[in-house]
Image: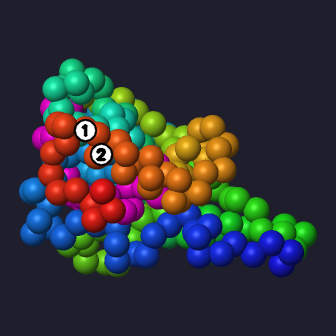
Amino acid sequence: MAVSPSASHAWYPPADSYWVDPAQANEYPFRYGDVFATPDHPGCVTSKGKRWPHVIVLHPSCEINAKSASDTAILVARVNRIQNLSAPQRAVVRLGWREENLVAKVAHTNTFWMPPLPMQEDGADWYADFRRLVSVDPKSLDESGREACMSHDARVYLIRKEMSFKYRWNVSIDEVRELERQRIASDPNFVGPKPSWV
């Protein structure tokens, strides 16, 4: 290939760094990147009326229960089983790159790959689809229940992928991490454990 993405260009962190240990998850408030059981909402169904498997929080960017976000609708994206895709599509979504004429190009920017959720028994992996969005109220999301608490490290990759999809910004993971470090360090109301890089 004429262009070969290096490890620093990876769209995703190591699979074992995505989720906070369920035993420690209660120390972390609900926030951006967390995966929830799908709330009872008419928009969270497929065209055939089947409820989405899970949803991932994309807004607000702060804690869901923060005072500034307490009355804010929560924007969630659909989370799908990657097994529902064709074999070639699975490989591309898991990598985030595809080869075209011996050149590596960004692929499936609207997706964010995720490994199996904590306590999940079947070992299936997932992907979020930024094109399938619904606004839900905080109460319904709270009632549905959080199924996976995303780590700060993985959240940085999610921010980068969403920026690439929304704005086509080619921002390095180090730049995104530094911006997030500054945000957390300057927030006097930040709740929960901070990442080691802050």
- Whether 195 is among the magenta residues is no
The answer to whether marks 1 and 2 mark residues whose Cβ atoms lie closer than 8 Å is yes
Name the disc covering residue 65, or none: none
Q: Which residues are magenta?
A: 138-159
Q: Residue at x 28, y 46 (%)?
A: 185
Place of residue 27 in the rendered image (x, y in percent of width and height, measured from the top left): 10, 56
Gap between marks 1 and 2, in whole Å?
5 Å
Q: Residue at x 59, y 38 (%)?
A: 166
Q: Residue at x 28, y 65 (%)?
A: 196
Q: How many C-alpha atoms fall within 10 Å of the one at disc 1: few (<14), some, or many (≥20)?
A: few
- Whether 158 is among the magenta residues is yes
Name the disc covering residue 187, or none: 1
- Check disc 1 and report its element: helix, strand or loop: loop
* Image-quadrant location for residue 168: top right
Q: Is residue 67 above or below residue 46?
A: above
Look at label 2 and name its amino acid: Ile
